[in-house]
């Protein structure tokens, strides 16, 4: 495989990054804002408001990996059970897209690094 193939894969990787940033913004606007507002009105012992930054990613993890048993009692960042209870089908779909895009981006990054392993610069 030549440099052209690596270039095409690098372009795909960049497009997954752009789509990931857009998905982050949409998920933040649609889901995280609504959940944060609810948790500010109804405080939970596991909720600490430090802005929307990483909470958006935590909400996506809690919704996308619904079958994985996150320990809801000891999860220090967000109330997992309340997040899952308040989530709509759109929220779950956006969380799945967000995590699938991240996984695709990481897979393409590994492929690029393997293709460039023996390339002279």
Image (cartoon, rainbow, N blue to C red):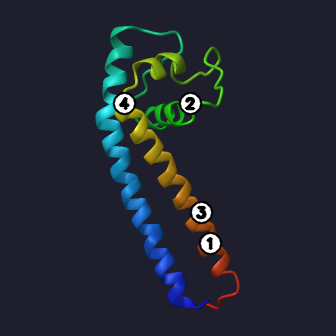
For the residues marked 3 and 4, what is the alpha-carbon distance in whole angstroms?
A: 27 Å
For the residues marked 2 and 3, what is the alpha-carbon distance in whole angstroms?
A: 22 Å
Counting from the top left corner in percent of width and height, residue 39 is at 39, 15
Residue drawn at x 31%, y 43% is 26
- Quadrant of the snapshot with the N terminus: bottom right
* Label 2 vs 1, first from the N-terminus: 2
The label nearer to you, 2 versus 1, is 2
Counting from the top left corner in percent of width and height, residue 90 is at 35, 35
Number of residues whose C-alpha sits closer than 10 Å to that of mark 4, classed few (under 14), some (14–19) or many (20 or more)? many
Q: Which mark is residue 111?
A: 1
Q: Which residue is mark 2?
A: 66
Q: Secondary structure at mark 1?
A: helix
Q: Which mark is residue 107?
A: 3
The label nearer to you, 4 versus 2, is 2
Residue drawn at x 51%, y 22% is 78
For the residues marked 1 and 4, what is the alpha-carbon distance in whole angstroms?
A: 32 Å
For the residues marked 2 and 1, what is the alpha-carbon distance in whole angstroms?
A: 29 Å
Q: Nearer the viewer, residue 118 or 83?
A: 83
Q: Quadrant of residue 86?
A: top left
Q: Nearer the viewer, residue 47 or 26?
A: 26
Counting from the top left corner in percent of width and height, residue 10 is at 49, 75
Q: Which mark is residue 32?
A: 4
Q: Are marks 1 and 3 in contact (CB under 8 Å)?
A: yes
Q: Is residue 72 above or below residue 104?
A: above
């Amino acid at each position: 495989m030549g440099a052209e193939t690596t270039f095409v894969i690098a372009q795909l990787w960049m497009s997954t990054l752009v789509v990931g940033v857009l998905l982050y913004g949409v998920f933040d606007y649609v889901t995280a804002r609504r959940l944060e507002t609810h948790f500010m009105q109804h405080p939970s012992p596991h909720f600490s408001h430090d802005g929307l930054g990483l909470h958006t990613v935590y909400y996506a993890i809690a919704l996308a990996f619904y079958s994985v048993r996150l320990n809801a009692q000891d999860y220090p960042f967000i109330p997992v059970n309340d997040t899952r209870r308040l989530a709509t089908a759109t929220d779950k779909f956006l969380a799945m897209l967000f995590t699938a895009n991240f996984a695709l981006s990481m897979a393409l990054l590994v492929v690029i690094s393997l293709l460039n392993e023996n390339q002279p610069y």
